[in-house]
Image (tube, rainbow, N blue to C red):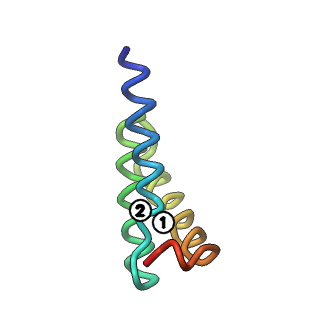
Amino acid sequence: MRKRFITLLAGAGLLGLAACGDTLPEQALLGAGAGAGTAAVLDGSIGAGALVGAAGNVAYCKAYPGRCR
């Protein structure tokens, strides 16, 4: 049961990466927060999670700008 809850919470965190933002700093900050939160829940490296989240969110927003407004 706990593993399923953590998986669902991690999935919600990954969906948070698509939160985007209007400017590049906002996109990086929102992605970093989602990545760090997901890493914390999964007992991973919070710093690495923040870096991956920031990069992923910025890349997503650049690839799909219409979905990020």
Quadrant of the image occupied by residue 22: bottom left
Answer with left or right where residue 51 lies relative to residue 22: right
Coordinates of residue 15 in the picture (x, y in percent): 46, 52
In terms of depth relative to the viewer, which is nearer, 25 or 20?
20
Q: Check disc 1: other Cα within 10 Å, few if <14, some if 14-19, many if 20+.
A: many
Q: Is residue 52 above or below residue 57?
A: above
Residue most extreme to the top: 1
- Name the disc covering residue 32, or none: 2
Q: Is residue 6 above or below residue 63?
A: above
Q: Residue at x 56, y 63 (%)?
A: 56
Q: Is residue 1 above or below residue 40?
A: above
Q: Residue at x 60, y 73 (%)?
A: 64
SS at badge 2:
helix
- Name the disc covering residue 40, or none: none
Q: Give the residue type at disc 1.
A: Ala
Coordinates of residue 1 in the picture (x, y in percent): 37, 14
Residue most extreme to the bottom: 23
Q: How many marks?
A: 2
Q: Is residue 18 above or below residue 8?
A: below
Q: Check disc 2: other Cα within 10 Å, few if <14, some if 14-19, many if 20+.
A: many
CA separation in Å, label 2 and label 1? 4 Å
Coordinates of residue 2 in the picture (x, y in percent): 36, 18
Quadrant of the image occupied by residue 32: bottom left
| Contact (Cβ within 8 Å) of mark 2 with mark 1 | yes
Q: Which residue is mark 1?
A: 54
In which quadrant is the C terminus drawn? bottom left
